[in-house]
């Protein structure tokens, strides 16, 4: 089992809809969780971090963490075509301080 | 406003050549990283450094070495390039402490080995 798993997509949603991106991880005691966004041909950039169970909101973005289920998600409300990108989930396992990245989910928002 | 600069955007090299990829950051970050990114495999850590003259192996260090003689500069070296090292190489930096996993990436260097 990969340490961080994401559906590669593409996930296609219409403009204005909620996009839901999911990520599961294998290390039960992972402590820190991150979402990076990568536009085509560009480098990744951090958009959200979450450390404790529950929801964390930042503008149109909400990160959700459920450590018991080893699951972290990213919701994008009122999706825009400019949100079309690959979203990378990253986890820091307990026994290391290195980020482990998933392979990313490609999101397409169509007008 | 460029904060992490990678010296070459595109490189084409021949098998067996020595390749240098340079990365410079102007944010006074302690931590620097080299990743490669391949379709279906995601971002994989090659080497990282938490201080000048310090280096640690990541998940896929074979065939690579690094150098960090100055805080702002972290170089990736392919001693003898092979075709399976054709990839996108991304340099990143971060602060120590609570910001250690907030990575700022460079624009990437796309290497093709023929």
Image: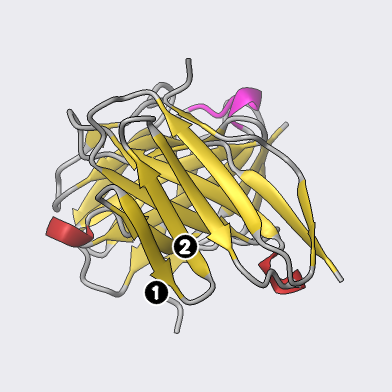
- Residue A40: give x, y in percent of width and height: 70, 58
Q: Secondary structure at mark 1?
A: loop
Q: Chain under label 2?
A: A
Please determine whether, in this image, residue B51 is positioned above or below residue B15.
below
Image quadrant holding the C terminus of chain B, namely top right
Residue where numbered disc 2 is placed: A62
Stretch of the chain drawn in magenta: B80-85
Specify whether A25 is left or right of B19. left
Residue where numbered disc 1 is placed: B3
Specify whether B17 is left or right of B100. right
Image quadrant holding the N terminus of chain B, namely bottom left
The colour scheme is secondary structure
User: Who's the residue at 22% across and 61% down the image?
Assistant: B99
User: Who's the residue at 27% across and 39% down the image?
Assistant: A98
- Residue A4: give x, y in percent of width and height: 45, 31
Q: Residues within 10 Å of mark 2 (few under 14, many from 20)?
A: some
**Magenta stretch contains residue B61:** no
**Number of callouts in the render?**
2
Discs 1 and 2 carry the same chain letter: no
- Residue A7: give x, y in percent of width and height: 64, 35
- Residue B11: give x, y in percent of width and height: 64, 50
Residue A78 appears anywhere in the view = yes
User: Who's the residue at 57% across and 36% down the image?
Assistant: A103
Q: Residues within 10 Å of mark 1 (few under 14, many from 20)?
A: some
User: Who's the residue at 26% across and 34% down the image?
Assistant: A30
Q: Residue furthest right?
A: A111
Specify whether B107 is left or right of B22. right
Residue B96 appears anywhere in the view = no
Q: Residue furthest bottom?
A: B1
């Amino acid at each position: 089992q990969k340490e961080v798993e994401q559906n590669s997509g593409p996930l296609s949603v219409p403009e204005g809809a909620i996009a839901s991106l999911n990520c599961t991880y294998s290390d039960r005691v992972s402590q820190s969780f991150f979402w990076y966004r990568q536009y085509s041909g560009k480098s990744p950039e951090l958009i959200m971090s979450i450390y404790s169970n529950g929801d964390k909101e930042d503008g149109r973005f909400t990160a959700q963490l459920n450590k018991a289920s080893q699951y972290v998600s990213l919701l994008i409300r009122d999706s825009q075509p400019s949100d079309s990108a690959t979203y990378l989930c990253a986890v820091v396992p307990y026994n290391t301080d290195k980020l482990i990245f998933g392979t990313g989910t490609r999101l397409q928002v169509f007008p | 406003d460029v904060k992490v600069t990678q010296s070459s955007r595109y490189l084409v090299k021949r098998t067996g050549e020595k390749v240098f990829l340079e990365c410079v950051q102007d944010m006074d970050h302690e931590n620097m990283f080299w990743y490669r990114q391949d379709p279906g495999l995601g971002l994989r850590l090659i080497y990282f450094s938490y201080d000048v003259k310090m280096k640690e192996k990541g998940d896929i260090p074979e065939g690579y070495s690094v150098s960090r003689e100055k805080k702002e500069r972290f170089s990736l070296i392919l001693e003898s390039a092979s075709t399976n090292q054709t990839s996108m190489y991304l340099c990143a930096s971060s602060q120590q402490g609570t910001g250690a996993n907030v990575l700022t990436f460079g624009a990437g260097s796309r290497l093709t080995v023929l």
